[in-house]
Amino acid sequence: MRTLRLAVPALAVCVALSACGSQGVGGGTPTPTPTGAQPVTSQPTPDPTAPPSVVAPTTPFGPKTPKPGGPSTPPGVGATTLSGTVQSGVEPGCVLLDGYLLLGGSPEVLTPGARVEVTGRVEPGMMTTCQQGTPFVVTAARRS
């Protein structure tokens, strides 16, 4: 009789768990969206023939103004040059130049307090462990 008292609740638990596991039957294939549209993962590219005022980046507070000492005229396709004094970041090993997080480059050149000129490209979507600055991938660095 004691075995029956233990077996009945155990059987009830098994039935309940198997009922929960059978919900959502469908072979694991996701259901399509009602419109069939794909999510947007990137911004459209601006029209190169449009006037510069149309394609200028904006913020919720109006047009973006260049920072003093910020990027200068590109020296080559996709390259930008920055110059100024390197500052320490809030995380160890993170260095900044005029609000840009410097990634790569020679650690001997890019020391806090050094006056430098760096060439590279801005990568605003890049993930980093540093908690500040817009990522800037350095391709060349020299003291100035």
Image (cartoon, rainbow, N blue to C red):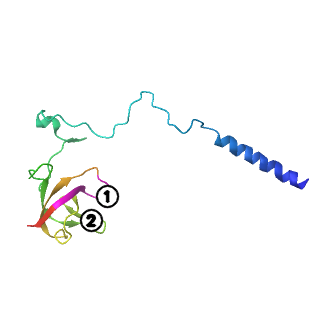
For mark 2, what is the residue? Answer: 94
Residue in front for this viewpoint, 29 or 46: 29
Q: Residue at x 15, y 34 (%)?
A: 54
Which of pointers 2 and 1 lies earlier in the amino acid sequence? 2
Residue 109 coordinates in the image, percent (x, y): 16, 70
Q: Is residue 45 magenta?
A: no
**Residue 88: which numbered mark, if any?**
none
Q: Is residue 128 magenta?
A: yes
Q: Residue furthest front?
A: 27
The kind of secondary structure element at disc 1 is: loop
Residue 7 coordinates in the image, percent (x, y): 82, 51
Quadrant of the snapshot with the C terminus: bottom left
Q: Is residue 113 above or below residue 139?
A: below
* Region in magenta: 126-139
Residue in front for this viewpoint, 142 or 85: 142
What amino acid type is highlighted by mark number 1? Answer: Thr
Left or right relative to 139: residue 35:
right
Q: Residue furthest top?
A: 35
Residue 99 in sight from this viewpoint: no
Left or right relative to 107: residue 128:
right
Q: Residue furthest right?
A: 1
Task: Residue 62: name its quadrant.
Answer: top left
What amino acid type is highlighted by mark number 2? Answer: Cys
Graded by Cα atoms within 10 Å as few (under 14), some (14 to 19) or many (20 or more), the crowding at tag 1 reads few
- CB under 8 Å between callouts 2 and 1? yes
Left or right relative to 114: residue 5:
right
Graded by Cα atoms within 10 Å as few (under 14), some (14 to 19) or many (20 or more), the crowding at tag 2 reads many
Give how far apart the Cα atoms at labels 2 and 1 are: 10 Å
For mark 1, what is the residue? Answer: 128
Residue 101 coordinates in the image, percent (x, y): 23, 59
Q: Residue at x 27, y 65 (%)?
A: 94
Residue 55 coordinates in the image, percent (x, y): 16, 37
